[in-house]
Image: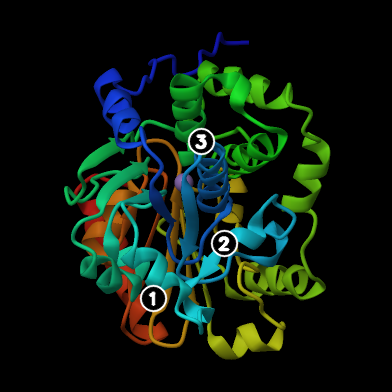
Amino acid sequence: MRNFRLNIVFMQIANSKIEELKSMLQTPKNIVILSHTNPDGDAIGSSLAWAEILKNGGHNVTPIVPNKYPYYLDFMPNTSSILFYKDDKEGRVKSALKSADIIFCLDFHTMTRLDGLGDIIDENQHAKRVLIDHHLDPNEDFDLMISYPEASSTCYLVALLIESMFGAETITASMAENLFVGMMTDTGNFAFSTITPDVFRVVSILASKGIDIPAIHNHVYNSFTEGRARLFGYVINRKMKIFHNGTVACMSLTSDELKRFWFQQGDSEGFVNYPLTIKKMKMSAIFTEHTDHIRVSLRSRGNIDVNVFAQRYFNGGGHKNAAGGKSFMSMEDTLKHFEASVKEYSREGNI
Ligand SMILES: [Mn+2]
């Protein structure tokens, strides 16, 4: 067998950034931790672990996301502390943001991923804004940017931060569980090319805190509804279109189809990865109809850059091999636009 080496480029958070963060946190502060719309395991895990360590340091911390996370993440520790902007009738989100001294933005790189929340943040001009993220091309709109696109997850970044600021011994079992979920889900269960030997060093620290890794795996990957299984079968069998010489796949789900399978938020998570189990496949896309737009999810293998593709054709971005975006056309036009974009992108030698 060929001797395979993990990507050993060593990623380290700059000391100057750690010192700046430490000085911001010297005295007790009102802190808001924000993450993106349709939050995933990495968004929730990093927010909750970061919230817990800051709370333990005597700060007043409120984690906020624009809308609810998928039901299969309900098991994660301390999820009851999260505020959801969409369901917030008492104005707790607004008042937390108003009185915040520091606003941490975790696992996203542009305010457009916050939907309506962005405007409320702008009302608070005195709060320091700190980014902790691993997406490509972040907005420059922050007082402190801890932006490492080479990091496999935001949870990994948060683990490194906690380790260097407070020491690995301050990581509790609940922090470890939350961090593990994000590290596992954002690396496709430790399979993507973003993993490094240091990822496993951090995992071994988390594992030593007594977390039940098989149980976490079951919660995340084997806790779906019957509707989700049937929807998956339907979309692969009936809706997957393969073109470009068998190297590009796309799938689509209209809101009528989603209703037929009792769709719940998060149910189509992971579908987009499946076409890449076909040997020749290089790129995969799924289009899901929402009330005012079509959500676009893109995955690729190797050198095919779906971050650039999403930026150029679908008002989005993300990572090289996993990105997302939006379309405001009809489903039919969106699919036509996708095929035409693939053609153009491949003419330039990108696929
Ligand atoms: Mn992430």
Give the residue displayed 38% in from the left and 16% down from the top.
9
Residue 132 locus on image (x, y percent)? 36, 41
Q: How many marks?
A: 3
Say left or right for 95 vs 139.
Answer: right
Whether residue 325 is visible, yes or no, is no
Disc nearer the start of the sequence (1/3)? 3
Disc nearer the start of the sequence (1/2)? 2
| Residue named by callout 3 | 57
Q: Secondary structure at mark 1?
A: helix
Q: Amino acid at mark 1?
A: Leu
Residues marked 3 and 2 touching at CB (< 8 Å): no
Above or below — where is 37 with respect to 208? below
Q: Secondary structure at mark 3?
A: loop
Instruction: State the image quarter where residue 110 is shown.
Output: bottom left
Say left or right for 310 vs 56.
Answer: left
Q: Amino acid at mark 3?
A: Gly
| Residue named by callout 1 | 335
